[in-house]
Amino acid sequence: MVINMKIAIFDFDGTMYKHETFTLFMQHLKERFPKKYRRFYATILPIYLGYKCKLIPERTMKEKLMHHYVRALQTLSESEMKQFFQGIVDKMKGNFHTEINERIKTHQKDGYYTMIVSGAFTPLLEIVNQAYQMNALIGTNIPSANNPLDHVHAERKTSLIKAFMKDHTINWTDSYAYGDSLSDLSVLELVGHPVAVAPDQELEHIAQQRNWEIIR
Protein backbone atom coordinates (compact mmCIF):
# COMPACT_ATOMS: atom_id res chain seq x y z
CA MET A 1 0.00 0.00 0.00
CA VAL A 2 1.15 3.51 -0.83
CA ILE A 3 0.11 6.22 1.65
CA ASN A 4 -0.71 9.77 0.51
CA MET A 5 -0.46 8.89 -3.20
CA LYS A 6 -1.21 11.77 -5.56
CA ILE A 7 -2.74 10.85 -8.89
CA ALA A 8 -3.39 12.62 -12.19
CA ILE A 9 -6.29 11.23 -14.23
CA PHE A 10 -6.67 11.94 -17.95
CA ASP A 11 -9.67 11.37 -20.17
CA PHE A 12 -8.72 10.49 -23.76
CA ASP A 13 -11.30 11.62 -26.36
CA GLY A 14 -11.43 15.41 -26.46
CA THR A 15 -8.78 15.72 -23.73
CA MET A 16 -5.51 14.02 -24.66
CA TYR A 17 -6.72 13.53 -28.23
CA LYS A 18 -8.40 16.63 -29.69
CA HIS A 19 -11.32 14.83 -31.31
CA GLU A 20 -13.72 11.95 -30.74
CA THR A 21 -12.47 8.52 -31.80
CA PHE A 22 -16.00 7.70 -33.04
CA THR A 23 -15.46 9.52 -36.36
CA LEU A 24 -11.98 8.08 -36.79
CA PHE A 25 -13.24 4.57 -36.06
CA MET A 26 -15.90 4.83 -38.73
CA GLN A 27 -13.45 6.18 -41.29
CA HIS A 28 -10.93 3.43 -40.63
CA LEU A 29 -13.56 0.70 -40.61
CA LYS A 30 -14.80 1.96 -43.98
CA GLU A 31 -11.29 1.82 -45.44
CA ARG A 32 -10.29 -1.55 -44.03
CA PHE A 33 -13.56 -3.50 -44.02
CA PRO A 34 -16.14 -1.90 -46.36
CA LYS A 35 -18.75 -4.66 -45.90
CA LYS A 36 -18.51 -4.47 -42.11
CA TYR A 37 -18.76 -0.70 -42.35
CA ARG A 38 -21.96 -0.78 -44.41
CA ARG A 39 -23.64 -3.11 -41.91
CA PHE A 40 -22.34 -1.05 -39.00
CA TYR A 41 -23.46 2.26 -40.51
CA ALA A 42 -26.95 1.00 -41.30
CA THR A 43 -27.31 -0.17 -37.71
CA ILE A 44 -26.02 2.92 -35.92
CA LEU A 45 -27.54 5.62 -38.15
CA PRO A 46 -30.99 5.66 -36.45
CA ILE A 47 -29.30 5.79 -33.03
CA TYR A 48 -27.02 8.66 -34.02
CA LEU A 49 -29.85 10.62 -35.64
CA GLY A 50 -31.95 10.10 -32.51
CA TYR A 51 -29.12 11.58 -30.45
CA LYS A 52 -28.72 14.54 -32.82
CA CYS A 53 -32.46 15.21 -32.61
CA LYS A 54 -32.19 15.06 -28.79
CA LEU A 55 -34.47 12.02 -28.62
CA ILE A 56 -31.73 9.76 -27.23
CA PRO A 57 -29.47 10.89 -24.33
CA GLU A 58 -25.72 11.03 -25.02
CA ARG A 59 -24.98 8.28 -22.50
CA THR A 60 -27.53 5.90 -24.08
CA MET A 61 -26.26 6.74 -27.57
CA LYS A 62 -22.63 6.00 -26.62
CA GLU A 63 -23.53 2.73 -24.90
CA LYS A 64 -25.48 1.54 -27.95
CA LEU A 65 -22.72 2.56 -30.33
CA MET A 66 -20.13 0.67 -28.28
CA HIS A 67 -22.21 -2.50 -28.56
CA HIS A 68 -22.28 -2.15 -32.34
CA TYR A 69 -18.56 -1.29 -32.45
CA VAL A 70 -17.90 -4.58 -30.72
CA ARG A 71 -20.04 -6.54 -33.17
CA ALA A 72 -18.02 -5.09 -36.03
CA LEU A 73 -14.75 -6.15 -34.40
CA GLN A 74 -15.48 -9.51 -32.80
CA THR A 75 -14.88 -11.56 -35.94
CA LEU A 76 -11.35 -10.17 -36.35
CA SER A 77 -8.36 -12.31 -35.41
CA GLU A 78 -5.97 -11.06 -32.73
CA SER A 79 -3.45 -9.90 -35.34
CA GLU A 80 -6.16 -8.17 -37.40
CA MET A 81 -7.39 -6.44 -34.25
CA LYS A 82 -3.92 -5.11 -33.43
CA GLN A 83 -3.41 -3.90 -36.99
CA PHE A 84 -6.83 -2.26 -36.98
CA PHE A 85 -6.17 -0.23 -33.82
CA GLN A 86 -2.61 0.59 -34.87
CA GLY A 87 -4.05 2.07 -38.06
CA ILE A 88 -6.39 4.28 -36.04
CA VAL A 89 -3.54 5.49 -33.81
CA ASP A 90 -1.46 6.28 -36.90
CA LYS A 91 -4.26 8.58 -38.09
CA MET A 92 -4.22 10.43 -34.74
CA LYS A 93 -0.70 11.79 -35.18
CA GLY A 94 -0.57 15.57 -34.94
CA ASN A 95 -3.94 15.77 -33.19
CA PHE A 96 -2.96 15.51 -29.55
CA HIS A 97 -3.24 18.47 -27.17
CA THR A 98 0.29 19.86 -26.75
CA GLU A 99 -0.49 21.42 -23.37
CA ILE A 100 -1.94 18.16 -22.05
CA ASN A 101 1.18 16.33 -23.20
CA GLU A 102 3.23 18.81 -21.18
CA ARG A 103 0.98 18.37 -18.13
CA ILE A 104 1.49 14.61 -18.30
CA LYS A 105 5.27 15.02 -18.36
CA THR A 106 5.13 17.49 -15.46
CA HIS A 107 2.96 15.23 -13.30
CA GLN A 108 5.22 12.26 -14.01
CA LYS A 109 8.30 14.30 -13.13
CA ASP A 110 6.61 15.41 -9.88
CA GLY A 111 5.93 11.83 -8.84
CA TYR A 112 2.20 11.63 -9.56
CA TYR A 113 0.63 8.27 -10.38
CA THR A 114 -0.75 8.93 -13.88
CA MET A 115 -3.80 7.21 -15.38
CA ILE A 116 -5.79 7.24 -18.61
CA VAL A 117 -9.46 6.60 -17.83
CA SER A 118 -11.58 6.53 -20.97
CA GLY A 119 -14.46 4.91 -22.76
CA ALA A 120 -12.14 4.26 -25.70
CA PHE A 121 -11.20 0.66 -26.41
CA THR A 122 -8.35 -0.68 -24.28
CA PRO A 123 -6.29 -2.01 -27.25
CA LEU A 124 -6.21 1.51 -28.70
CA LEU A 125 -5.19 3.05 -25.36
CA GLU A 126 -2.42 0.46 -24.95
CA ILE A 127 -0.88 1.50 -28.25
CA VAL A 128 -1.19 5.20 -27.42
CA ASN A 129 0.37 4.63 -24.00
CA GLN A 130 3.57 3.33 -25.54
CA ALA A 131 4.45 7.01 -26.07
CA TYR A 132 3.28 8.18 -22.64
CA GLN A 133 4.17 5.37 -20.23
CA MET A 134 1.26 6.13 -17.90
CA ASN A 135 1.11 4.02 -14.74
CA ALA A 136 -2.36 2.64 -15.45
CA LEU A 137 -5.08 2.39 -18.09
CA ILE A 138 -8.80 1.95 -17.59
CA GLY A 139 -10.66 1.55 -20.86
CA THR A 140 -13.46 -0.41 -22.49
CA ASN A 141 -12.28 -3.98 -23.07
CA ILE A 142 -13.29 -5.98 -26.11
CA PRO A 143 -15.69 -8.48 -24.52
CA SER A 144 -15.29 -12.24 -24.66
CA ALA A 145 -17.72 -15.08 -24.06
CA ASN A 146 -16.97 -14.89 -20.33
CA ASN A 147 -16.76 -11.10 -20.02
CA PRO A 148 -19.64 -8.93 -21.29
CA LEU A 149 -19.17 -5.40 -22.55
CA ASP A 150 -18.47 -2.92 -19.76
CA HIS A 151 -18.54 0.55 -21.30
CA VAL A 152 -16.39 2.92 -19.25
CA HIS A 153 -18.46 6.08 -19.20
CA ALA A 154 -19.66 8.80 -16.78
CA GLU A 155 -20.08 7.51 -13.19
CA ARG A 156 -18.71 4.11 -14.21
CA LYS A 157 -15.30 5.77 -14.57
CA THR A 158 -15.40 6.89 -10.95
CA SER A 159 -16.35 3.49 -9.57
CA LEU A 160 -13.58 1.80 -11.57
CA ILE A 161 -10.97 4.34 -10.41
CA LYS A 162 -11.91 3.77 -6.77
CA ALA A 163 -11.85 -0.01 -7.20
CA PHE A 164 -8.49 0.12 -8.99
CA MET A 165 -6.92 2.28 -6.25
CA LYS A 166 -8.58 0.55 -3.26
CA ASP A 167 -5.29 -0.77 -1.86
CA HIS A 168 -3.76 2.73 -1.66
CA THR A 169 -4.47 5.84 0.38
CA ILE A 170 -5.05 8.61 -2.15
CA ASN A 171 -4.42 12.27 -1.44
CA TRP A 172 -7.47 13.38 -3.43
CA THR A 173 -7.04 17.03 -2.41
CA ASP A 174 -3.67 17.31 -4.16
CA SER A 175 -4.66 15.13 -7.12
CA TYR A 176 -5.62 16.28 -10.63
CA ALA A 177 -8.19 15.21 -13.20
CA TYR A 178 -8.59 16.36 -16.80
CA GLY A 179 -11.77 16.04 -18.87
CA ASP A 180 -13.66 17.74 -21.66
CA SER A 181 -17.33 16.92 -21.22
CA LEU A 182 -20.16 16.66 -18.73
CA SER A 183 -19.69 12.88 -18.69
CA ASP A 184 -16.33 13.49 -16.95
CA LEU A 185 -17.93 15.46 -14.11
CA SER A 186 -17.90 12.68 -11.50
CA VAL A 187 -14.17 12.10 -12.07
CA LEU A 188 -13.39 15.83 -11.91
CA GLU A 189 -15.30 16.05 -8.64
CA LEU A 190 -13.05 13.39 -7.09
CA VAL A 191 -9.99 15.64 -6.95
CA GLY A 192 -8.86 18.95 -5.54
CA HIS A 193 -7.57 20.14 -8.91
CA PRO A 194 -10.15 19.52 -11.66
CA VAL A 195 -9.21 20.84 -15.10
CA ALA A 196 -11.71 21.32 -17.93
CA VAL A 197 -10.02 20.85 -21.31
CA ALA A 198 -11.71 22.57 -24.29
CA PRO A 199 -14.95 21.83 -22.42
CA ASP A 200 -18.40 21.37 -23.89
CA GLN A 201 -21.00 23.98 -23.00
CA GLU A 202 -22.36 22.15 -19.95
CA LEU A 203 -18.95 21.45 -18.42
CA GLU A 204 -17.69 24.96 -19.15
CA HIS A 205 -20.67 26.43 -17.30
CA ILE A 206 -19.95 24.25 -14.25
CA ALA A 207 -16.21 24.97 -14.39
CA GLN A 208 -16.83 28.72 -14.45
CA GLN A 209 -19.31 28.51 -11.58
CA ARG A 210 -16.87 26.51 -9.45
CA ASN A 211 -13.79 28.47 -10.51
CA TRP A 212 -12.06 25.41 -11.96
CA GLU A 213 -9.08 25.73 -14.27
CA ILE A 214 -10.03 25.75 -17.95
CA ILE A 215 -7.62 24.93 -20.78
CA ARG A 216 -9.05 26.27 -24.02
Image: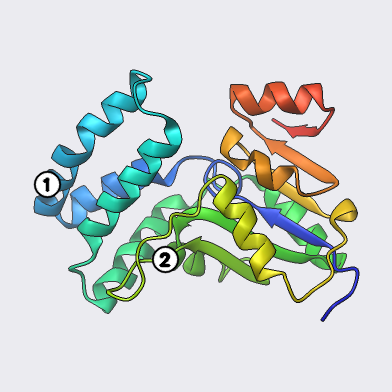
Q: Which circle, 1 or 2, is nearer the viewer? A: 2
Residue 39 numbered tag: 1
User: Which secondary structure, mark 1?
Assistant: helix
Determine the image quadrant of residue 48: top left
Residue 171 numbered tag: none
Q: Amino acid at mark 2?
A: Asn
Residue occupying image coordinates x 48% and y 68%: 127
Residue occupying image coordinates x 16% and y 48%: 37
In the displayed structure image, the side of residue 86 where residue 36 appears, left or right: left
Say above or below: 97 vs 143: above
Residue 141 numbered tag: 2
Determine the image quadrant of residue 189: top right
Q: Amino acid at mark 1?
A: Arg
Picture coordinates of residue 69, whole percent (x, y): 28, 53
Residue 206 visible in the displayed image: yes
Q: Given the current orientation, which residue lies at the most extreme top position? A: 53
Disc 2 crowd rating (10 Å Cα; few below 14, some 14-19, many 20+) is: some
Position of the N terminus, as image quadrant, is bottom right
Picture coordinates of residue 79, whole percent (x, y): 27, 77
Residue occupying image coordinates x 32% and y 44%: 64
In the displayed structure image, the side of residue 174 where residue 10 appears, left or right: left
Disc 1 crowd rating (10 Å Cα; few below 14, some 14-19, many 20+) is: few
Mark closer to the chain start, 1 or 2: 1
Position of the C terminus, as image quadrant, is top right
Comparing 101 with 50, the one in front is 50
Comparing 25 with 142, the one in front is 142
Say above or below: 196 vs 82: above
C-alpha separation, residue under disc 1 versus residue under disc 2: 22 Å
